[in-house]
């Protein structure tokens, strides 16, 4: 319904999209959906019917009537029908679209409160071939928020400057999203931050007043899908601290050149696609800062060109303070984007969380009320192509329909002696792998599963619903400044905190009790409570430069691993060593040939839960097949010893670079994972 808009930001709304589906297909899909909790439905379908070679407007009307009739029998609310967008890029298709819209208007005229409205695309480079649709069928008796959003998105996409930032959610506007929040203790509110990032998925999330120090490791504050950059205070100092959560896949490096001892500032440079490098500063000014602080800040600003998320603790709604900030911005050619109150209590309103930019290439910026902290969230969306992080997939074998007896019977029917006819170890191995893998694929086929980020297991739907209620009442209290709203917001906030503690305590207690006799599951539970961050190498620094593509990163790592030996050897001085002992070989070294029993015993030692390697041969299937395949595998191993040739595929391995702390250049060690249990 809404092109180029992320539906996750629509409150109390479920958006179901069926790319390429006709009206008939939509009807079939809706039949299997549970609509008992649905109050109203908006239908937007018919574009694919118009593009069909068998287009028939009478059949389209018949399918549409059937679809609406079926919906009327299943929901108690209202049904609204949306028209199809005009396609100026395809005149023939556009004629059909106009015919369908006229027919729909004549059928469902009673459901419409506004005439059909179509908007032409203004920027083909941004929006592609589809025109921007406007939903015209919403009545005021639907929930008000959705009506307002529909209208605002029409205005916003045609003329972006007309977007009302106080109403349009940040999660619906496309671009590179940067947000900032003064949180006042990250550890106590980590679950709330996880819930926030799971819902909004910011590219960069800056935090001030983390209240962290060197005694707190990254794994204690790690969030799935993000990397961490942080600057803490000393152990002897309390409060303060700045941190950035950076989405995995975004290339970045910390900049140390601009750091000043008296200023808490974290500087990070980002290398975004189709864009110049972006330098971002996350700065915290404590309330006790001296008068010279702004002068030092001015000196630091003039050294760089960037975006700054600043918690100034200097209220610019005060004319005197506003003058100081304006002078600072003017001296450094900066533009301050935040003009709404960022910290609101029942007795005061201040603007102390600011965003400075040197480039006005910004889609929108604003303030969003949250109940996590007494500060509101500030954000900006930069007109930069959003970094598309490729999804992670894992392959595993499905044993859902696995029949062990038939699998064993078919294994016995295979002529494994044909492998012994081969005198080349590589050919013998490829033939063996082909025979075994084909049978495995038949009984336990490979399935590809997309790995999605998830919240901690103790966070329930009730908890998420309560956090949304908390944010709603805080937003209402900020707007109306009514004592009842403030009391309700604080009450719900306390409920959220208590519920979070109780859920976490209950989860830990139950899982530990259930797994006291199973150490493996017990440690898995402990690791979930304190996860270890998964370090990924997506950039490598060398000679003060860093790689910009995955290919460059892989090449630099390959150069490093292949040259590290010679590099280390060159650092040792040549020494003359006198040989005092003459070593002679007494017996000629040789390998003993293996037996089938030895191969069988080794296969039985495999762990059934061991991950598969590059060849996707599963350990569980190997153990089941061991009595049958051990003889053929023994022949391949002995052939390798006899010919002094190690099978080529057994030499392949996955190499994972391990990041060291405070890495400024290529300083990585290789963790080598063997590709298969057989090797």
Image: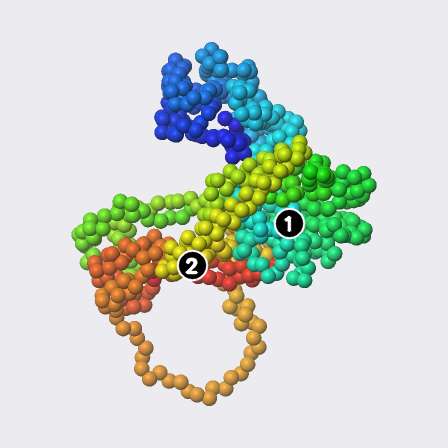
Q: Is residue 365 visible?
A: no
What residue is at 22 percent from the left and 67 percent from the top?
597
Q: Residue furthest top?
A: 106
Q: Residue at x 62, y 56 (%)?
A: 212
- Label 1 crowd (10 A; few <14 / some 14-19 / many >=20): many
Q: x and y percent of residue 110 in the render? A: 49, 12
Q: Residue 128 location in percent, x, y?
A: 54, 30
Whether pointer 1 and pointer 2 mark residues with C-beta atoms closer than 8 Å, the reply is no
Q: Which residue is mark 2?
A: 523
6 or 348: nearer the eye? 348
Give SS at disc 1: loop
Q: On the rendered structure, is 394 left or right of 167?
A: left
Where does label 1 land, which residue? 184
Q: Position of residue 523 (x, y in %)?
A: 42, 59
* Relative horizontal placement of residue 127, taking residue 367 as reference (left or right): left
Circle 2 — which element?
A: helix
Distance from Cα at disc 1 to Cα at disc 2: 31 Å
Residue drawn at 58 percent across, 40 percent down: 491
Side of 392 relative to 256 (left or right): left
Asked if residue 581 is positioned above or below residue 300 in the image, the reply reads below
């Amino acid at each position: 319904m809404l092109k180029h808009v992320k539906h996750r930001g629509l409150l109390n709304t479920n958006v179901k999209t069926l790319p390429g589906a006709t009206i008939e297909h939509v009807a079939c899909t809706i039949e299997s959906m549970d609509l008992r909790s649905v109050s109203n439905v908006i239908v937007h379908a018919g574009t694919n019917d118009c593009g069909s070679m068998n287009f028939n407007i009478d059949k389209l009307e018949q399918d549409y009537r059937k679809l609406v009739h079926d919906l009327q029998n299943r929901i108690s609310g209202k049904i609204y029908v949306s028209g199809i967008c005009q396609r100026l890029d395809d005149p023939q298709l556009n004629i059909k679209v106009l015919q369908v819209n006229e027919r729909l208007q004549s059928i469902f005229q009673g459901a419409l409160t506004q005439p059909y409205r179509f908007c032409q695309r203004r920027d083909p480079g941004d929006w592609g071939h589809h025109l921007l649709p406007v939903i015209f069928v919403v009545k005021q008796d639907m929930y008000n928020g959705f009506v307002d959003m529909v209208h605002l998105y029409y205005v916003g996409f045609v003329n972006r400057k007309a977007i009302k930032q106080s109403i349009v959610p940040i999660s619906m506007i496309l671009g590179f999203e940067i947000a900032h929040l003064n949180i006042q203790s990250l550890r106590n509110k980590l679950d709330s931050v996880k819930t926030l990032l799971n819902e909004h998925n910011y590219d960069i999330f800056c935090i001030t007043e983390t209240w962290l120090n060197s005694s707190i490791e990254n794994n204690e504050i790690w969030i799935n899908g993000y990397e961490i950059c942080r600057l803490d205070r000393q152990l002897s100092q309390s409060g303060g601290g700045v941190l950035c959560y950076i989405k995995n896949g975004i290339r970045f490096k910390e900049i140390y050149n601009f750091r000043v001892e008296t200023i808490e500032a974290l500087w990070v440079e980002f290398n975004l696609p189709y864009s110049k490098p972006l330098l971002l500063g996350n700065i915290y000014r404590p309330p006790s800062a001296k008068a010279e602080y702004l002068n030092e800040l001015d000196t630091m600003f003039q050294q760089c060109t960037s975006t700054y998320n600043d918690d100034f603790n200097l209220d610019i709604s005060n004319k005197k303070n506003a003058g100081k900030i304006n002078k600072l911005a003017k001296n450094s050619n900066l533009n301050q984007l935040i003009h709404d109150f960022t910290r609101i209590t029942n007795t005061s309103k201040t603007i102390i969380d600011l965003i400075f930019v040197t480039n006005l290439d910004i889609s929108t910026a604003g303030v969003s009320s949250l109940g996590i902290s007494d500060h509101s969230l500030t954000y900006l969306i930069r007109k930069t192509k959003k970094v598309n992080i490729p999804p992670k997939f894992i392959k595993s074998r499905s044993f859902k329909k696995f029949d062990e007896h038939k699998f064993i019977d078919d294994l016995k029917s295979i002529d494994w002696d044909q492998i012994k006819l081969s005198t080349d170890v590589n050919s013998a191995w490829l033939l063996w792998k082909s025979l075994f893998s084909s049978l495995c694929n038949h009984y336990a086929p490979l399935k590809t599963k997309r790995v999605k980020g998830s919240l901690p297991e103790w966070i329930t739907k009730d908890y998420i619903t309560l956090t949304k209620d908390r944010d709603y009442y805080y937003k209402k209290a900020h707007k109306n400044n009514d004592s009842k709203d403030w009391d309700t917001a604080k009450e719900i906030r306390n409920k959220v905190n208590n519920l979070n503690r109780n859920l976490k305590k209950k989860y830990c207690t139950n899982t530990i009790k259930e797994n006291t006799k199973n150490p493996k599951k017990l440690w898995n539970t402990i690791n979930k409570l304190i996860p270890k961050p998964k370090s990924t190498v997506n950039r490598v620094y060398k000679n003060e430069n860093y790689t910009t593509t995955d290919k460059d990163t892989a090449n630099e790592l390959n150069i490093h691993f292949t040259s590290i030996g010679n590099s280390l050897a060159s650092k040792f001085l040549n020494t003359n060593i006198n040989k005092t002992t003459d070593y002679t070989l007494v017996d000629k070294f040789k390998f003993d040939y293996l037996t089938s029993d030895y191969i069988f015993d080794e296969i039985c030692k495999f762990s059934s839960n061991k991950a598969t390697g590059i060849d996707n041969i599963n350990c569980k299937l190997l153990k089941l097949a061991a009595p049958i395949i051990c003889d053929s595998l023994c022949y391949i191993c002995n052939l390798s010893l006899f010919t002094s040739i190690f099978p080529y595929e057994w030499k392949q391995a996955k190499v994972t670079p391990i990041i060291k702390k405070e890495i400024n250049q290529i300083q990585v060690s290789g963790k080598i994972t063997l590709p298969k249990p057989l090797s």
